[in-house]
Image (cartoon, coloured by chain):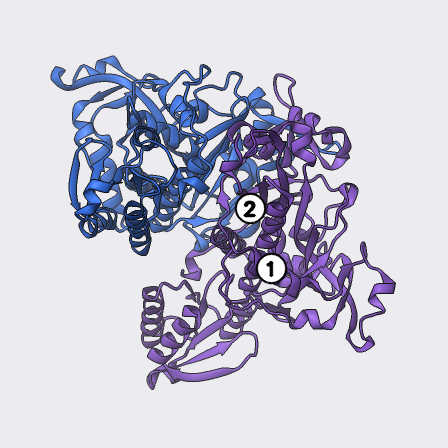
Chain colours: A purple, B blue
Amino acid sequence: MRLSRYFLPVLKETPSEAQIVSHRLMLRAGMIRQAAAGIYSWLPLGYRVLRNIERIVHEEQQRAGHIPMLMPTLQPAELWQESGRYDDYGKEMLRISDRHGRDMLYGPTNEEMITDIFRSGVSSYRELPLTLYHIQWKFRDEVRPRFGVMRGREFLMKDGYTFDTTKEGALHAYNRHLVSYLRTYERLGLKAIPMRADGGPIGGDYTHEFLVLAETGESEVFYDSEVTDLTFGDRVIDYDDVDQCAAVLEEFTTRYARTDETHDEAIFAEVPEDRRRSARGIEVGQIFYFGTKYSDAMGATVTNADGQAVPVHMGSHGIGVSRLVGAIIEASHDDKGIVWPEGVTPFHVGIVNLRQGDAACDTACEGIEAALEAHGLDPLYDDREERAGAKFATMDLIGLPWRLTVGPRGIANGLVELTNRRTGESEEMSVEDAVARVAAIYAR
Amino acid sequence: MRLSRYFLPVLKETPSEAQIVSHRLMLRAGMIRQAAAGIYSWLPLGYRVLRNIERIVHEEQQRAGHIPMLMPTLQPAELWQESGRYDDYGKEMLRISDRHGRDMLYGPTNEEMITDIFRSGVSSYRELPLTLYHIQWKFRDEVRPRFGVMRGREFLMKDGYTFDTTKEGALHAYNRHLVSYLRTYERLGLKAIPMRADGGPIGGDYTHEFLVLAETGESEVFYDSEVTDLTFGDRVIDYDDVDQCAAVLEEFTTRYARTDETHDEAIFAEVPEDRRRSARGIEVGQIFYFGTKYSDAMGATVTNADGQAVPVHMGSHGIGVSRLVGAIIEASHDDKGIVWPEGVTPFHVGIVNLRQGDAACDTACEGIEAALEAHGLDPLYDDREERAGAKFATMDLIGLPWRLTVGPRGIANGLVELTNRRTGESEEMSVEDAVARVAAIYAR
């Protein structure tokens, strides 16, 4: 992409309404624009990151055997009256009346709707287990939306629903989700720690939240420092293998790690003192086994092997897709701007032409752009007639992890400079080596 | 994908509420389920088709140099009050009041919002031309939603907006859209004819609708039979070349082709009688140049080369993504079910195991499945313990363009049967040849 043909409305001033760094940087880098309180347009740069996250979530869900579909944003009130949540939900539910006066709502979550789909389409235990998920816009009418996309009203979420004949089956689905979430967050460049969560009014021990440590997190968290050393890495998992998935759950959730909602001083005190940590965290996902709450209320049963109708055991499992854009920035930035992890970066590499209009520089930049594209990469070529300082500042602000700088002196000797955004380290090398190096980084 | 692990709730009976064939077949094939009047869940099979269409639209938009972004579903009323359309729009606009009593709406289209984004981010003619587009859910509160996804209330649409300093520039953007739409529809397996459309209250000659001929179309159309012979094919176009794009417009819009809204008997009479046709058509897209209507009303100006502020010339260009799923079925089905064009099919090929549990058949099917996946294809393997007739009926209903049938007699000689869904023709061949043949079909 040529920057001269792109739409990247970066801001020079820091917007006064933004209280946290991710919100400031997303506005300054031209990633989002507020449409109304807590409702944002995703400008081209922000949209690229959002799509990358969405793609990774899809890939990891399908790797785990979960089936994608899509439920609508608006739902009829009847479904929520059936489960009893229509009155419980309060003012966070955006209630809508259509032209015929029918009560609708903008879905904040989809347990009722998926249960309705399930009961109409599945009748036998032979069709189970089943996990259906979607990635769709949702709405929660927060009384005080803030922190940009971190606590918006219209937000993009992946929510998946598991259906099993037995509690044991449902707990395997729970463990499988934990495994796939660990992989997902690592691919996004995040360390997200599963922490014992509060079951809320439903209760139950089977819920974990995934938290990213960041100073601006909304939750206070308490953990054994050993949990931050755990890495899922590229181990190969058979998602159908009950023992393998259970072992990962065991490995990642045995050590103390809780939010303020479930924190227990007495248990925490048993952690060796030098490993006790408290910090702040951003919630980026949650897994939840809730048994037969909705299947009982809504009559979602299957016939078992004995021909009896039994309610299905369900779980719901969410990842905050749009919120993750903010969370990644909170966890990865410096005073010059964003530092994207390679997995989600909007462009793989920036090309800075130090002397636009100089034939040798222009030709070299165009050649590098074409060579990178031939490797399946998306470079962003700053071909504007701007001074070098402004071009560097833009690249630093928008946070591309790698930058190739092309100037008249270097290119006379066939040399360009490759710069790592995170470390700031630069290395001079031939054009061919630079292209090969960048291609190798992303081939990993 | 193994059918035994998939969620494909096909219906045996024809649903009585569905009046047209695409609606009936989408319900019967387990592609959609109604959530409320005119609002649908996209079950896994339907979602795969929807995503394929979305991907092709994205690819063709970006090939033409258009920039993807994403605007939210909800919009503040203020923007529409500024353009004057808030009162004009009537009851088709779903109006919403949030918890603080602020007036919002579920966007039926995005001219106002994109104009607002433009005016805040672009100030100079040097940043033009610019085309921004998104694919997002929209809502029109139809008084009588019907025909399934063809006239739903919540629908997925691609809408793109062009910004130019001059009318000439804007008309090139218009022509470029026409070219890219022709390519898009052909990739979707459709013949969509650009027809002179009615400018509506704005007036103007610069609007064309794209219509797919189908008996169930909502519009009556009149055309010169020569227009149905035109094919865009795989010609290479430079989308920046004004003359090339204008020549395509000329080629595809010179002959008579109009909907009942713009039909003119006197001009039609000049078409040789043996080429005059009337039929019914489904609208699947529209392009529109509307000048400075919104930029005047909302103050979207740029400074030109002389330093003067001038309003930008705009156009908007839409493709009905969710509606296309229905339109494709209307254009491509038979009495057994859907016949998907290869470009959008939910699975590339079906594998039918005639004797599930037979070791040779099972092994062969698994090998074929793995070999096809190694070619990057998505087969759907019917591994259920069902009789052959039921398996064939399901495959015919859901419309996969190719089917591989594996039975004990053939496989004893290393042979399987490859069947073309459209023609019904079958050919016996070795497993290796069958895999290679299917791979070659999709490599085109």
Q: Is residue B350 left or right of residue B319?
A: left
Quadrant of the rendered image containing residue B269: top left
Nearest the camera: A262 or B322? A262
Disc 2/disc 1 C-alpha distance (Å):
14 Å
Q: Which mark is residue B131?
A: none
Residue B263, horizontal then vertical, whole percent: 29, 17
| Three-letter amino acid code of the residue under disc 1 | Leu
Nearest the camera: B330 or B107? B330
| Three-letter amino acid code of the residue under disc 2 | Ile
Residue A312, horizontal then vertical, whole percent: 61, 36
Circle 2 sits in a helix, a strand or a loop, which is it?
helix
Quadrant of the rendered image containing residue A108: top right
Residue that carries the numbered disc 1 in the rendered image? A11
Residues indicated by labels 2 and 1 sit on the same polypeptide chain: no
Q: Residue at x 55, y 58 (%)?
A: A184
Residue that carries the numbered disc 2 in the rendered image? B117
Q: Chain of mark 2?
A: B
